[in-house]
Image (tube, grey):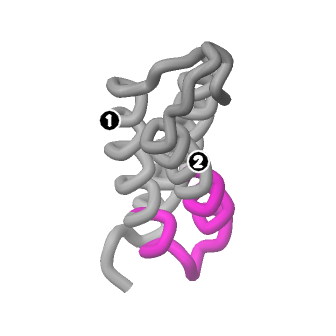
Amino acid sequence: MNSDGRRHPLENALSVCTILCGLIAFAAGLVPSAHSVASWLGVLGFCGGLYSQYVSATTPERALNIVGIVASFVGVAFGIRHGGFLP
């Protein structure tokens, strides 16, 4: 993800965390009994992804951020639909 030839360890870590939170929130959102996991990870991934997008330095980081933000949003929407933040 360092397409500009420089290292960006913080930005890369934030992008990877965003995509992981988004994918887990999306997958948990498909399971009605995991609604609280989907809701909390979706919010964490969405807010963290917005910050990660703000500080990103390269295009591959931005691409991962957008995929993670969208997956987090869909995961939190499914989680809220299935029962919300509390178990």
Could you say which quadrant of the image residue 40 lies in? bottom left
Mark 1–mark 2 distance (CA, rounded to whole Å)? 13 Å
Query: Residue 19: percent from the left, percent from the top?
Result: 59, 46
Q: Nearer the viewer, residue 14 or 25?
A: 14
Q: Within 10 angstroms of label 2, few (less than 14), some, or many (20 or more) residues?
A: some
Q: Secondary structure at mark 1?
A: helix
Q: Secondary structure at mark 2?
A: helix
User: Where 19 sits versus 35, above or below?
Assistant: above
Query: Residue 1: percent from the left, percent from the top?
Result: 67, 29
Q: Residue at x 60, y 16 (%)?
A: 59
Q: On the image, numbered disc 1 is attached to which residue?
A: 51
Q: Nearer the viewer, residue 57 or 73?
A: 57
Magenta part of the protein: which range? 22-39
Q: On the image, numbered disc 2 is attached to which residue?
A: 16
In the image, residue 70 lies in the stretch drawn in magenta = no
Mainly helix, strand or loop, the magenta region? Answer: helix
Query: Residue 33: percent from the left, percent from the top?
Result: 57, 81
| For residue 69, side relative to residue 2 (left or right) | left
In the current view of this chain or complex, which residue is farthest to the bottom? 87
Q: Residue at x 35, y 27 (%)?
A: 55
Could you say which quadrant of the image residue 85 lies in? bottom left
Q: Residue at x 52, y 53 (%)?
A: 17
Q: Within 10 angstroms of label 1, few (less than 14), some, or many (20 or more) residues?
A: some
Sequence order check, earlier mark of 1 and 2:
2
Dot 1 amino acid type:
Tyr
